[in-house]
Image (cartoon, grey):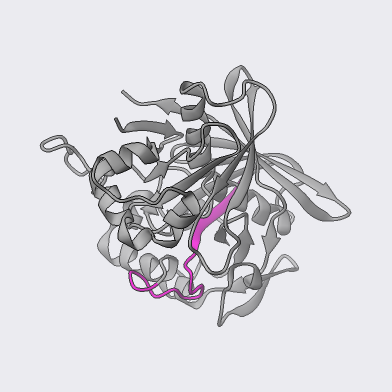
Amino acid sequence: MTQFYDARGNIYAVISPDAVRRSGIRLPQTAAEAAQTRERWACRTITAFCGWAPGTQPAGAKAHRSDGLLIGPFQSVPPYDLLIVNTDGTLAERSGNGLTIFAQALTDQGLMPAHGHCLLKVHHDKGDAVSPVETSVEPAEVEGIRGFWLDLGKPEFGPSAVGAQRLEAVELNGYRLNQVAALCSINPAWNHSQFVRIGNPHCVTLVADIASLPSNEQMRELELSTGLTRIAFAMPTGAGQPCPAGVNLQWAMLESEGRIVARVFERGEGPTASSGTSASAVACAAWSVGWVAAGEVAVSMPGGTTPVLLEEQDGELRRVSLFGTARLMP
């Protein structure tokens, strides 16, 4: 049976590889082989497990019941392999909320170690990144809330980190950033962007005021959605510009000391209530222009506020960690 979990408004379906196969879909035995053959099974799997039951789709709801599908684990003991399938049938290299949900699902199944770290390995088919992408997850409690710390490792900055092309360099408060022409053509206020890779690629656009942050409702409107899809999604759905493999888009504004307000348009999905890796990328981008110092940064999105821990050494960010929580939906 498909189970749905919610992590700060980001919803994923979780299902085992055997359950996929029992449905008649020929999913390969290993996550590595499945990732390399995803065109044969991914869209069918999304339709089978992320669709609304007949007559249950609420008015105005998205086309799918969830923001994606987590398939795994492929083993009975850690480390665990899994696949993160976007609703357009593509694979994601990493998802902070998705991995939080997967850790909670493993806990509910009695497969997550009660103490210490557990390694999760996400397999994908992107040619510009190593597969699998590994994330160490540890059960924890923050301010009385039980969840998981995700070790996302060391971030990379700049166009080369995400394969971005045809960009102009600009400055913000003396810091070197980039201008994405396609974003500026939509809104002239979107003219200062920082590229960050945290296992997956991000383009964080830094804005000066709340009016320059697009709402999720605005991003679902046809004209804006079409423009952002061309930027964020790889071909053939989008144009893959400036990143041929696609890129997650964020907009960020400094609200107060140590607190950033952000919005997200995800590659392979569109506007989302929250995103763990996006929150981490936003915190890193804010650090790169001096908006925040290393330590804990709060990133607020429509789905809730995410604590991100930045660890700095010798003027570089050496580690980014994300705290996440998830709940099983009825």
Residue at the image position 64 percent from the left and 24 percent from the top:
140
> Residue 295 falls in which quadrant of the image?
top right
| Nearest the eye: 231 or 178 | 231
Q: Is residue 51 left or right of residue 292?
A: left
Which quadrant would the N terminus be assigned to in this image?
top left
Q: Magenta segment: does it hold 186?
A: no
Q: Residue visible at 16% across and 40% down?
A: 59
- The answer to whether 9 is drawn above or below residue 218 in the figure is above
- Is residue 13 shown to the viewer in this render? no
Q: Spot the residue most to the front.
A: 29
Secondary structure character of the magenta stretch overall: loop
Q: Left or right of 314: which side holds 323? A: left
Does the magenta portion include 239? Answer: yes
Left or right: residue 316 versus residue 234 is: right
Residue sitting at the far left: 55
Image coordinates for residue 154, horizontal then vertical, percent: 72, 53
Residue found at the very far top of the displayed protein: 144
- Relative image position of residue 62 (x, y in whole percent): 26, 47
x and y percent of residue 101 in the render? 47, 34
Residues in magenta, as a range: 235-254
Q: Pick whichever, 235 or 186, lies toward us.
A: 235
Q: From the top left corner, tell me how far across and down residue 113 is, in percent.
A: 61, 24
Placement of 83 over or under 138, stated as above or below: below
